[in-house]
Amino acid sequence: MSVQVAWASDAHLDQAGWRLGHFYDALALLPSMGYRRLIITGDIATAETVAPALLKMSRTQNLGIAFVLGNHDFCYCHGLGDFTAIRRIVSKIPIYLHEAEEGIELAPRMRLVGVDGWFDGRAGLRLAEAPILEDIADRDTALLECRLQKILGNGDQDIVIATHVPPFPEASLHQGKPSDPKNAPLFCNVGLGKMLRRIARRHPRVNFTVLAGHTHDPADFQAEPNLRVLVQAAEYGGPSFELLDFDPLTRFPTRKPGLVWKKPS
C-alpha cells in the first residue's frame, strides 16, 4: 500500500488575499481523499503571521501537519527576526520538524525528518556575507546529519527530508534553468547537498527523498541512485499544494497536482 501525503511549500499565506479561504477549504478535503498528513517546507507566512497560520492548519480535522520554516517565516516587516524566539513560538504547534529529534514515522521503515535550512552562499559567485550564511546553514546541516546517523544507526529505513532551500544547484532553478552565478548563492544550500550525498553513498539500501521549495520553480533531480530531490513550484498570492504517493517498493513518490493556482497570462 502506498504512503500518501500532501505537500505545501512557499504558500506565503500573508499575501494570499481572497484565495486564503480556498486554501484552507482545500486542506479540509484532503483526509477524505486519503491524505492525512501535510508536509510544509517553509515560507508559510512572515514572523508576525506564521504561528496563527500554522495553528489554523493544525486544527484541520483528521489532518496532521509537519513543518519546517523558511527565510520569510523569520522576517518581520522591519527585517530579520530572532531565530530562537520565533522557533520557540512555533515549537508549541505540532509537529515542528526542526525540533523533532527522531522525526515522525510515515509508515513501517519509513521516517520523515527535517530542518529549516538556509542558503549558504557557496553556489555561484561568492558574496561578502558568505561566512554568515555558511554559519547559519551549516548549523542546520550538522543537526540533520546527527539525526540521520542516529536513525540509520538503528537499522535501514527509507527517509523523507523536509527542508526549505534546495541542496543542489541542479535543483535550484529559475524559469526552468539553473540559477545564474549572481543569484545562485541565495538559492542553494551546497553544504547540505554534500552531506546528503555522503550519507546516501554510505547507505545504498536506503532511499532518500528531499522535499524543498524557496525557488518557486519546480524541479526533480536524481542526485544519487538512492537520493532524489523535489522542489515545488509557487506563486505569490496563490497558495497551493501537491499530492505525493510513495511507491510501496521503491519508496519514491509520484507527484500529482493538488491545489494549483496559475498566474494570469
Image: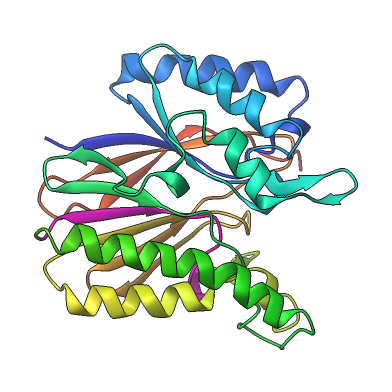
Q: Is residue 159 magenta?
A: yes
Image coordinates for residue 133, horizontal then vertical, percent: 67, 73
- Which contiguous range is marked in magenta? 156-171
Viewed as shown, does residue 10 lie left or right of 72? left
Is 208 in the magenta? Answer: no
Decide if residue 76 is on the left or right side of residue 29.
Answer: right
> Where's the C terminus, which quadrant?
top right
At x 73% / y 39%, what residue is drawn? 47
Can you say whether 209 is above or below 100 in the image? Answer: below
Q: Considering only vertical position in the picture, is 227 above or below 30?
A: below
Q: Nearer the viewer, residue 256 or 56?
A: 56
- Structure colour scheme: rainbow
- Name the spot of residue 33 as percent of width and height, x first: 32, 19
Tell which residue pokes out farthest to the bottom in this image.
Answer: 125
Of 90 and 59, nearer the camera is: 90
The percent position of residue 155, horizontal first and vertical second, equals 9, 59
Q: Would residue 99 be seen by someone viewing this image from the given angle? A: yes
Residue pictured at 38% horizontal, 44% vertical: 100
* In the displayed structure image, the side of residue 145 where residue 156 appears, left or right: left
Residue 40 in view (yes/no): no
Q: Camera-side residue: 33 or 188?
A: 188
Which residue lies at the image location 65% right of the left edge and 64% below the top edge?
175
Indicate the quadrant containing the N terminus: top left, top right, bottom left or bottom right. top left
